[in-house]
Image (spheres, rainbow, N blue to C red):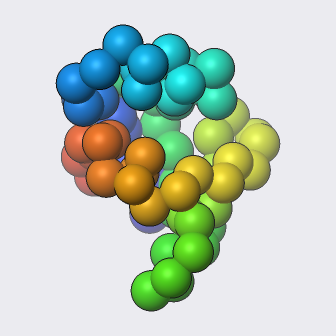
Amino acid sequence: MNYKIVSIGEGKKIKLRLISMGLYVGVILKIIKNDKFGPLILSVKGSRISVGRGLAMKIIVERV
């Protein structure tokens, strides 16, 4: 299932970190792995990215 980033939480540092990973408003992503513990594995523009749960909670998405 694909998702579109619609918002990113407050904080310039958080936004810059996510942008450096290719995650910003409007990007389409797919969740590859979301276990109870550990980071989420996302597919973004053909690359796989590991995002910690704390950081992932700052990303608001909608289903596409």
Give above or below for 11 relative to 61.
above
Residue nearer the viewer, 36 or 31:
36
Q: Residue shown at 75%/41% (left/top)?
A: 46
Instruction: Tell me if 1 is positioned left or right of 21 in this view.
Output: left
Give above or below for 5 relative to 52.
above
For this orientation, the residue located farthest to the right is 47
Q: In which quadrant will I find the N terminus?
A: bottom left
Q: Residue shown at 31%/52% (left/top)?
A: 57
Give above or below for 54 relative to 23.
below
Residue nearer the viewer, 6 or 9:
9
Q: Position of residue 34 (x, y in %)?
A: 50, 75
Evaluate whether residue 61 shows in this view. Answer: yes
Instruction: Tell me if 7 is positioned left or right of 14 in this view.
Output: left
Q: Position of residue 14 (x, y in %)?
A: 42, 26
Q: Position of residue 10 (x, y in %)?
A: 22, 24
Give above or below for 5 relative to 38.
above
Q: Residue shown at 36%/13% (left/top)?
A: 12
Q: Residue shown at 69%/48% (left/top)?
A: 49
Q: Position of residue 63 (x, y in %)?
A: 28, 52
